Structures are given as C-alpha cells and as structure tokens.
Amino acid sequence: MVGRKKSSKKKGKQPVPLDKGPLGGTALSLSQRLISIGIDGKAGFDSAEHVARAALEDHPADRERAIDKVVSQHRRLAASAGFVTSLGGFVTMAVALPVNLTGFYLINTRMVAAIAHLRGYDLTDPGTRTAILLTLVGGDADDVLRKAGVVSTGRLANLASSQLPPPAVMVVNKAVGFRLIGQLGDKLFTKLGKGIPVAGGVMGAGLDAFLLSRIAKGARKEFPPTERLLRAGGR
C-alpha cells in the first residue's frame, strides 16, 4: 500500500517542507526534466517506449532478453564520451550540477522506464513516472517517501495504482531531486575521494557501469511483470 501519511497534531511530526531553500527550484526542475526527457524523449534522444520496442523487436519471444539489451545499450551509452552533448537545454538548466552526472541520471531514467514498459507498465501514469524516479535513489526511496509524507510498503510500482493526488506527486518528485543532488556530494565524493575530477566532466567508465547495473537490478525488482502482461503470456 502507498498513500498519504496521516496528519499529526504535533508540528514536530509534520513532513519537512521540501520547497524551502535555494535548491528547491533546481530539485523540482531536475526531476521534471528527467521525467519529460528521460521518459518521453526529445529530438535526438529517443523515448523510453521507443527504446523498449526496438529491443523487443530483436527479442520478440523473450522480454527478459529485451531488458538485457536495454541495460547493455545504456551501459555503453553511459561510458561513451560526450553522450550529453546533444541534450541542449537539459544540461544548461542545471548549471550548478556536473554535466556528466545530470546526463547519467537522464540515461538511467530512460533505462528504468524502458524496463517498466517491457514489464507492462503505463509510462503515462503519474504514479509510474514517480516510481521510475524513485528507483534512481535505490535504498533511499523509502526515506524519500517518508520525508515527503507518503507511506510506502512493498514495491515502488505500487505507486502506479495508489492514485496519489498531484500535489503529493510533485512533493515526492521534488524530494527525489533533492536526494539526487545530495548524492553528488554525500555519496560519490565520499566514496571516491576528493581527487576525482567530477567538476571537469570526467567520471570513470567503471563507476558508471557499476552504478547503472545497480539501478538496473533495482528496476527489475521494483517493476515485476504486471498481471495484464502475465495473463497475455508475457507478450
């Protein structure tokens, strides 16, 4: 079950406001653009559905092999130099964030969305789109939901059927944006050390592959085949 957290009379138990501070606009803008471009695509960057359908054409009888192809394709893309050069406005909107990392989040968004599509999920559903974003933060997803005032149990895909009101969706999306921005300093720099020239747009291909594979593994877990897909025999 996923739903709004019951309000508490004690102010100390209220969800932390996520729109405060100078990063509020950047966090929401990052999440919105990850969704709009990473899922729906733009000129020069195919949509997640297009990528999923292309993979399925190569493996029409085996959706899991199609998912393997999607993951492999995005792993190569993440490791290639200059893969964000054609993204135009997406990169310039987040001038305070390293370009290579915003691009990395973008291709991971598309990869997770393509996996969700191949597992039978509707990519136009707001709950599914938010669940895709939450997959990017991995094990932090439950904490993000809690701080946004949303109670979650079970897989993130349950958000697709939870019918969260639009304001709640926006709050969760913004919370994901904050967490992604926080990961830049709290996780990557801590794990890799201060000598990694992230600000210069350089991120090791090995690290890219590791993080992408971990997110792909999480997506497979969080988006099991839908009942509709199972009834259709996986086709």
Image (cartoon, helix red, strand yellow):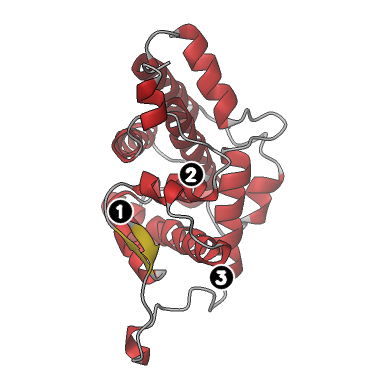
Q: CA distance from mark 2 to mark 3?
A: 18 Å
User: Is 162 on the left-hand or right-hand side of 215?
Assistant: right
Residue 6, picture quadrant = bottom left
Q: Amino acid at mark 2?
A: Tyr
**As displayed, is residue 47 above or below residue 126?**
above
Q: Secondary structure at mark 3?
A: helix
User: Is 221 on the left-hand or right-hand side of 126?
Assistant: left
Could you tell me residue 220's position as x and y percent? 32, 33
Residue position marked by numbered label 2 in the rendering = 105
Residue 25, picture quadrant = bottom right
Residue position marked by numbered label 1 in the rendering = 193
Residue 175 appears in the picture as rendered: yes
Residue position marked by numbered label 3 in the rendering = 24
Q: Amino acid at mark 1?
A: Gly
Q: Secondary structure at mark 1?
A: loop
Could you tell me which residue is drawn at 38 percent across and 57 percent down? 183
Q: CA distance from mark 1 to mark 2?
A: 21 Å
**Dot 1, crowdedness within 10 Å: few (<14), some or many (≥20)?**
few
Q: Amino acid at mark 3?
A: Gly
Q: Are marks 3 and 1 in contact (CB under 8 Å)?
A: no
Q: Which of 178 and 187 lies nearest the eye of the viewer? A: 178
Q: Which of 234 and 211 lies nearest the eye of the viewer? A: 234
